[in-house]
Image (cartoon, coloured by chain):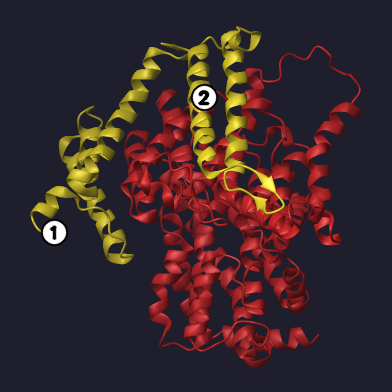
Chain colours: A red, B yellow
Amino acid sequence: MDNLSELFHGFTIAVTVPHLALMVVGVLLGILVGVLPGLGAPNGVSLLLPLTFGMQPVSAIILLSSMYWGALFGGSVTSILFNIPGEPSSVATTFDGYPMARDGRPTTALATAFGSAAFGALIGVILITFLASWVAQVALAFGPPEYFAVYFLAFASFVGMGGAAPIKTVVALAIGFAIAAIGIDTVSGSVRLTMGIDELVKGVNFVVAVMGLFGIGELLVAVEEEFHARAVSSRIDWREVFRAVGRLPRHGVALLRSAAIGCWMGITPGGPTAASFMSYGIARRFSRRGRYFGTGEVEGIISPETADHAAGTSALLPMLSLGIPGSATAAVMMGGLMIWGLNPGPMLFVDQKDFVWGLIASMYVGNIVAVALVLLTVPVFAALMRIPFVIIAPLIVIICVVGAYSVSNSYLDVVMMLGFGIVGYLFKKLFYPLAPLVLAIVIGDKAEDAFRQSMLMSKGSLGIFFANKLVTCLVVAGIALLLLPLVLQLARPFRKTASPDADTPAQEKVII
Amino acid sequence: MISRRALELATAILTGGFGVAVVVQSLDNGIGWSSAGVDSGTFPFLTGVIIVAGSLYNLARGVVPGARLASVPIAITSIELRRLAGLFVPAAIFVAAIPLLGMYLASAIYVFAVLAIPRHQSVLRSAIAAAATALALYVVFERMFQVSLPHGAFAAAFGF
């Protein structure tokens, strides 16, 4: 119980008035950058970094990590209210969060998301507290084959769940992979698929694709229907916030499963994005109400949010214990660590006990502060849903345009974003699934790189994916997840032989 | 009025066209899988082939009238088409105007136009909303987070 006494020592450092004030400031700024499109936790943390040079390292890291928590929470707000995910990891939240908000339950959706996110973060911090050193060794065992296996697992758990017409799913997935391949190929250094446009060398950023596909695409679908008879309740119900949080324990299994997926993906550097997609996919497959996923199901919000935050939190573990940043934000923070004169890596736990345990204690307190602040602001955000559509529509267009532009200060991105908007509309209209497309855009090139690096290591033999226990388990689990629905289908006795074609309009509604 | 079939066909042609472009482009990078590793064009080539094949299948499904398509014969009615254009055309003009007018001026005019011209809001309120939008963008992006948005060719001509 060495860790516990260290942790209590950490609390004495973290729970002081100036540090609590820093947490509040950090979280509020974080929520702001999280809500704003095009700005994310990495931007916010980089902008704050210069301010921290004069601070004590502990105070500085508390400010920055609080901002990170705030941004993680803020990113879910736009996903749920406007179907515009601010960060890759909150894409999966839009699938059920937005339908629920649109059906007039924005408060429930937001409160559920924040509550489960807090749970995920808590599990992540507990994991860091107790398993820091052991877990670091697992992450060290990760090479390209293991990376590929993790991505494969994420795809396997998400793709082929049925719902959409299979060929349309395949086309959507393949288009996503092709878009991910645009730009410089990191393995060979050659330029791919630029279609003769030089600017495409930088690739197609996920934010650009997602703003168009989800933001503009959804807007076009929405405007086509009657001018919004949204039954959003006109008064803000504070009790609903607490009721929604109070209902969370009923979904205990989903919470624990998602937290486990999140922690695993955070430590093994699969990252929050893969974690949230995978968690959503698995929940959809194993939940009794899986059929209704995509229409505003509570578990469809809980699963990605819990996994996202569990992964986001536990991603700090490899940064601290190994000096390997698990995410862009962690990389910026690590830069800060070095500027403050600290050396991330195993020696940090020996040399800088006050810093490490102060930080870990501040994660507990910071997340509580973040949840409190963000729950208090739920009614404010929910009120945004009541702004008339004619006003909100141009604002969403501007948000998407500015967001797409500010990713890399490129006008081409804005034009592409608009193009993705049309594609998003067509795909939605014709029931092509968007989720596999986005998943492939986000982690497609990473998966490809990992695969090709593995092939370089093994001289072209696929045997490398069965070379050791870890990678074999991952690959076998992935294949099992792919084949499971097929097996279930075959095992099921022919109960309804006369069921009509797979995608009748009633079922098509369920397709994401 | 656009039928569901026409929309299916158009989308399949769109995706297929993209697939063909991917296949052609990836051939430049070289395809192959040897003991020296996987060439950089291989994966794009495979995805391109899959896109083309899938699009052809979807195209065929669209041409052959099945029970599936018959259930939703009309995809977009003319009223819906007008609503779509009402949203998309101003947005496209807005995007097209950005290089010339800059983000601030373009977004202000855009907000004013979509609120005032269809008479959703009074001219005064539309003008206030337009000014507030531009100001909010400026304060948040240019000032708080130091992200420079395009100022436009006009502003550049006046030395901003």
Q: Is residue A171 visible?
A: no
Give the amino acid type for the residue marked by disc 2 in the picture.
Answer: Lys
Is B154 placed left or right of A482 in the picture?
Answer: left
Q: At numbered mark 1, what does the secondary structure look like: helix, strand or loop? A: loop
The image position of residue B43, as x and y in percent, is: 61, 42
Q: Quadrant of residue A506?
A: top right
- Of labels 1 and 2, the one closer to you: 1
**Along the line of sight, which residue is nearer the eye, A27 or B64?**
B64
Whether residue B160 is situated above or below residue B15 in the rendered picture? below
Near mark 1 (Cα within 10 A), the count class, few <14, some 14-19 or many ≥20, is: few
Cα separation between marks 1 and 2: 44 Å
- Quickly name the residue at label 2: A429
Q: Quadrant of the C terminus of chain B?
A: bottom left
Q: Residue at x 65, y 64 (%)?
A: A121
> Dot 1 falls on which chain?
B
Please give the count of numbered marks on the rendered protein. Answer: 2
- Quickly name the residue at label 1: B160
Residue situated furthest bottom in the rendering: A351
Whether residue B123 is situated above or below residue A478 in the rendered picture? above
Whether residue A363 is situated above or below residue A298 in the rendered picture? below
